[in-house]
Image: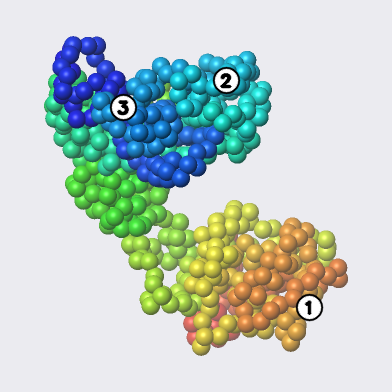
Amino acid sequence: MTQKKTGIMASDGTPASETTTKPYVVLARKYRPQTFDDLIGQDAMVATLSNAFEQGRIAQGYMLTGVRGVGKTTTARIIARALNFEVDGVSKPTVRLPTDPAAFGRHCREIMESRHADVIEMDAASNTGIDNVREIIESARYRPLVARYKVYIIDEVHMLSKAAFNALLKTLEEPPEHVKFIFATTEIRKVPVTVLSRCQRFDLRRVDVPQLSQHFKKITKEEGASAEDEALMLIARAAGGSVRDGLSILDQAIAFTNGEVKAADVRAMLGLADRGRIFDLLDLLFAGRAGDAINALSALHRDGAEPVQVLTDLSEAVHLATRIKAVGAEAARDALSAEEQRRAGSVAERLSVPLLSRAWQMLLKGIEEVGRAPSPIAAAEMVLIRMAYTADLPGPEEVIKALGGESVPARRAAPAPATADTAAPRSQSDYGDRAPAIPSAATGDTDQGSVGEDPGFAGGGLDESWLESAEGFSDEFDTDDPANASDLMPVSGGLRPDPGSFEEALDIIGQHRDLKLKVFLEEHVSLVKFDRATHSIELHLLQGAPPTIANELRERLNQWTSHHWMVALSKSPGAPPVAVVRRERQAAELERLKAHPTVAAALRAFPDAEIAAVRPIDGATDEDDDTGTRTG
């Protein structure tokens, strides 16, 4: 095959102007960087090494880490070349390495081709034992044959055994002046700390999509091929930040398309779905059109898109829309095209963050299911059906309002971030309508057994399911978050409340949505003393009360009221729990109402009826109560 003229130096150092017939060299090897200037996306490492070499601050060991294909081994060879660079007039390490083969140093070509006598490369994956390291230690005693330094490059160093690492420590810490070590690894966490502490560590980062795309564009031009920008972006996205992976895909794409790389061909080659059709499918899902979504998935599958890839692309689209929702349009700068940015922005405008988050979670779960399912396409269809049928379900806040008997409002767009000028504290009324409805106490039978250690208290069994909902509601309004605490602070002329009774203190806790604490205080605590003058409270714990409840109450009152409170525990029994008193009061009220002539007549007329609820009418007197009856 004929090598064409290239502007980027080939790894074998032959001039680009030569036209010879030789075996084909894959792009990943042909365009391997030869100097620090050729490295892309590693500016921090290049700057550090450049300054170190200029100042003569050369370490005895370097640790290069990063994902596959970002240039760890290549960088190690470039460092070895820089350490041993030697031409007439230059006799010290330098980072200013020539790219012209005519200006190469005495050792450059052999080092870059991994055949220099004094630059020893070892693959730790196949040389893991202590005997291999002993050979290195033994040979390190001798001076280099022809170069300035004897350089040991150990790739995948994390594969060395524990004994091998231990044997290497002493030589690595105090090597002969003519020895340098360069390690490369993809699993930095598996390298012992004792080794890391003896090396300078460089984390080679993933190359971002725009930079990788530009690099591929230059190589495509040098190869005499053509490629659409969107096709190169697709390849860069599929590479996942790895230059080598991307060049391998580009090599395959050039062969697949006969030198004219188009986005549609890349999608077909990689089994990707068209991004426009992905957003069309996303619109169908959020519109609840399950049938149309299934048909769209089938069409994508017929065109070569794998079901798991379709769900992955959907998750990327949801993520992009959510990022735009959270941080603005600049979040879409790495999108494949302006059209994708427009479509993602449209999704972000229409949908709320809770809905996008729910879709994200369902897609993540769906990707796992598709990977395990015997029929991936069937599993993907089930995922889309679930998404379509949950698209119009209300959020947790709306469910709570609906359970409380209120109408569910329309979804609101996420509010813009508050600024110092626009942020204002909210009053109690802003949140008062969001509290979940507490189930009414059972009427009639008030003897529900004892609560806790004191048998004299008629305890109410706490509804565990409601407590779980209260816990979730409390988590939503995290009172430990200063932002939420300031938002929920009751405002009355700028003053915090000063509770005059234990019941008022419980009301304050309820207003701040700490419903779990409120339930425990009402059901499992006996009040021994409440002193407003000294702002002190004494509590007697009953069975089921957490031992930390006194500290929690003190912290909440100190945060939400105008005074500092002392809350202590007492062994003396106190008053019955608030919930018990409330149930006894309700039972007494119920008995009083049963004796009312009108109610008594109604119960006689309908023997199977029972009083279901008692609701006061605005403006009604005690003698004018409203009762509700329910037929059996």
- The amino acid at mark 1 is Lys
* Secondary element at image label 3: loop
- Tag 2 secondary structure: loop
x, y percent for residue 591: 67, 73
Tell me where residue 1 appears, x and y as whole percent.
18, 12
Q: At 58% across and 82% down in the image, what residue appears? A: 496
Distance Cα–Cα, label 1 vs label 3: 90 Å
Considering the numbered disc 1 on the image, is that residue within a helix, a strand or a loop? strand
Whether residue 484 sits left or right of residue 130 in the image: it is left
Image check: 191 left or right of 227? right
* Residue type for callout 2: Tyr
Tell me which residue sits at (53%, 38%) in the image: 59
Q: Residue at x 65, y 75 (%)?
A: 558
Label 3: how many residues lie within 10 Å, few (<14), some (14-19) or many (20+)?
some
- Determine whether, in the image, residue 335 is placed left or right of residue 454: left
Query: Dot 2 corresponds to which residue?
Result: 142
Q: Which mark is residue 529?
A: 1
How far across and down, in percent of the image, does residue 55 sit?
Answer: 46, 45
Residue placed most toward the observer, 544 or 272: 272
Q: Quadrant of the C terminus?
A: bottom right
Q: Residues within 10 Å of mark 2 (few under 14, many from 20)?
A: few
As drawn, the label of residue 500 is none
Residue sitting nearer the eye, 553 or 511: 553
Q: Earlier in the sequence, mark 2 or mark 3?
A: 3
The answer to whether residue 379 of the structure is visible from this angle is no
Vertical comparison of 511 with 500: above or below: above
Q: Of discs 1 and 3, which sits in the foreground? A: 3
Question: In terms of sequence position, does the residue under pointer 1 or pointer 3 come before the other?
Answer: 3
CA–CA distance in space, label 1 to label 2: 85 Å
For marks 1 and 2 on the same chain, the one whose residue lies earlier in the sequence:
2
Q: Is residue 286 left or right of residue 420?
A: left
Mark sitting on residue 104: 3
